[in-house]
Structures are given as C-alpha cells and as structure tokens.
Image: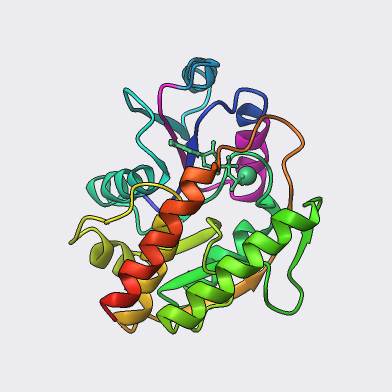
C-alpha cells in the first residue's frame, strides 16, 4: 500500500535537488518522493534520473516546458491519486522549507486534519535571510489575500503543505485558474471555502543559499490579479 508522496517542483535546481532528496528521505524514510521538473535547462532532471537508478523511493515527472508551479502541484495530486497515495506533502527544492518539519506536517494530517500548512506567520514561525523588501512583499501579500478573501490561515502563500486524501480528491475535481505562484492562494481558498479543516504548523523559512528565485514581477502581478478574481467570487 502506497502511503505518503512528497512532491517537489523544480526549475533549475541542480545545485539543491540531490542534497534535498537525501534530507527528505532522512526526515520521512517511508515516503516516496516525486520531483516535478519542467525541463530545467541546468540538467536537474538528469541528476534525478541518475539518482533514481539507486533510489527506489524517487520518481520524476518530466514535463516538456516551464508550465508553472500551480499546474505542477495539480499534476502531482493527480499522480498521487492514480498511484494510491493517501497524502501529498509539497515543498520547494531550495531548502527554504526545513525537511525536519515534514513529520509535524504529516502528523497533523494523520491525526485527521484535511490540510496542514507550514507557517511563517504564527507564533513559533520565522523568516531568515530575506531582505526587508521581500519580507514586506510577503507580509503585504498575505495581509491583502487574508482580508479580501476572508481567509483564516495566516500563511496563505507558502508552498510547504500536507494535503490529506480528502483534500486531494476535492481539489482535483476542478482545474485551477492560476498556473503560477498564485495557485497557492487559490488552493487554500478552495479548501477554506469547502470547509476543510486546516492547521498551521510553525516553520522557520530560510532564504535559498544556492540557485536563483524564479519569482518575477510578472508572477507578482498575476498573483494580485488572481486574488482580486477570487475575491469577486466569494
Ligand atoms: N516544475 C516547476 N517548478 C517551479 C516552477 N517555478 C518555480 N518552481 C519551483 O518552485 C519552487 C519555488 O520557487 P522559488 O524560485 O524558490 O520561489 P521563491 O522561494 O518564492 O523565490 C522551487 O522549488 C522552484 O524550483 C515551474 O514553472 N515549474
Ligand atoms: Mg524559494
């Protein structure tokens, strides 16, 4: 019986991915890992394929082009359901999401919560290494999203989450409107509006030390549009 699947979307993460997979296996020895790679030009996919030869708990979903974070999550959810997994944990591949918090996120879902959210914005949560500008951007995005969408969750934009089987079955019934980063807000909004139970697990988020952030001005603008669109449908 398949259990937990850990989905890691990657785009140009050659400097991080293999070390991360190792740390994830240490933190969650029973979970399988699915890397969802969008044809990274830096060869991330080849590194994963090579490691798969000696790692039976590692799999790759290789997509032909950069299709965005939102569609990567949805593809991971569909894969998990097809293969009989009972929960999906999502995390970034740049070590911003501490692997040692994986067990706490999974435990919350195993004890019956539909969705657990790794949170920077609850007591015990923190951010390390971000310049003031990025901190303000994230705090503002969360404040605006919470107010406009009337969300209860404090960290609406983080991608370190564990989705229960119930949450997955619900989310795959409808395609997302957003393909990029704003998918995180959309996924959360759908779960809250459906009345699914959510807990926030405090995490210390640490800025990446290797590789480049893929968030762009265009992504930020698109995310704002998504929040307004979702607000219009509340
Ligand atoms: N598969 C896939 N992964 C992506 C894409 N864009 C970003 N990622 C991954 O999503 C995660 C978060 O991206 P990152 O650049 O660290 O964003 P930031 O932390 O918000 O600056 C990382 O693991 C990226 O490699 C994409 O278009 N497709
Ligand atoms: Mg990052």
Quarter location, residue 62: top left
Up the image or down, 132 lies above or below 20; here it is below
Image-based side of 111 in relation to 21, left or right: left
Q: Nearer the viewer, residue 117 or 184?
A: 184
Furthest toward the left, the residue is 173
Task: For residue 204, say whether it is visible.
Answer: no
Work out whether residue 164 or residue 132 is closer to the camera in this orientation and state it. Answer: 132
Quadrant location, the C terminus:
bottom left
Q: Foreground residue, 65 or 109?
A: 65
Q: Is residue 224 above or below residue 38?
A: below
Asked if residue 100 is positioned above or below residue 57 in the image, the reply reads: below
Magenta span covers which residues?
19-39
Horizontal side, residue 84 vs residue 31: left or right: left
Residue 135 in magenta?
no
Tell me, yes or no, whether the highlighted magenta stretch contains residue 28. yes
Q: Which residue is located at x 53 percent, y 45 percent?
A: 217
Q: Position of residue 91 (x, y in %)?
A: 54, 49
Residue 153 locus on image (x, y percent): 52, 78
Instruction: Report x, y in % for residue 148.
Output: 44, 79
* Residue sitting at x 37%, y 61%: 226
Q: Nearer the viewer, residue 82 or 12?
A: 12
């Amino acid at each position: 019986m398949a259990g937990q699947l850990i989905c890691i979307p990657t785009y140009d993460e050659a400097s991080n991915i293999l070390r991360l997979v190792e740390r994830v296996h240490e933190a969650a020895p029973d979970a399988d890992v699915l890397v969802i790679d969008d044809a990274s030009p830096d060869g991330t996919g080849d590194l994963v394929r090579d490691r798969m030869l000696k790692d039976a708990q590692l799999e790759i979903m290789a997509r032909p082009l950069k299709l965005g974070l939102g569609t990567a999550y949805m593809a991971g959810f569909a894969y998990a359901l097809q293969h009989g997994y009972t929960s999906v944990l999502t995390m970034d591949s740049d070590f911003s999401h501490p692997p040692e918090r994986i067990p706490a996120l999974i435990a919350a879902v195993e004890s019956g919560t539909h969705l657990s959210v790794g949170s920077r914005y609850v007591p015990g949560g923190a951010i390390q290494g971000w310049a003031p500008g990025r901190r303000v951007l994230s705090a503002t995005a969360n404040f605006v999203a919470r107010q406009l969408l009337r969300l209860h969750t404090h960290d609406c934009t983080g991608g370190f989450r564990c989705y229960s089987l119930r949450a997955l079955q619900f989310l795959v019934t409808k395609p997302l409107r957003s393909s990029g980063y704003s998918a995180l807000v959309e996924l959360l909004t759908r779960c809250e509006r459906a009345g699914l139970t959510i807990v926030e697990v405090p995490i210390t988020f640490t800025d990446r030390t290797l590789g480049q952030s893929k968030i762009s001005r265009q992504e930020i603008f698109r995310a704002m549009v998504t929040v307004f669109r979702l607000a219009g449908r509340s």
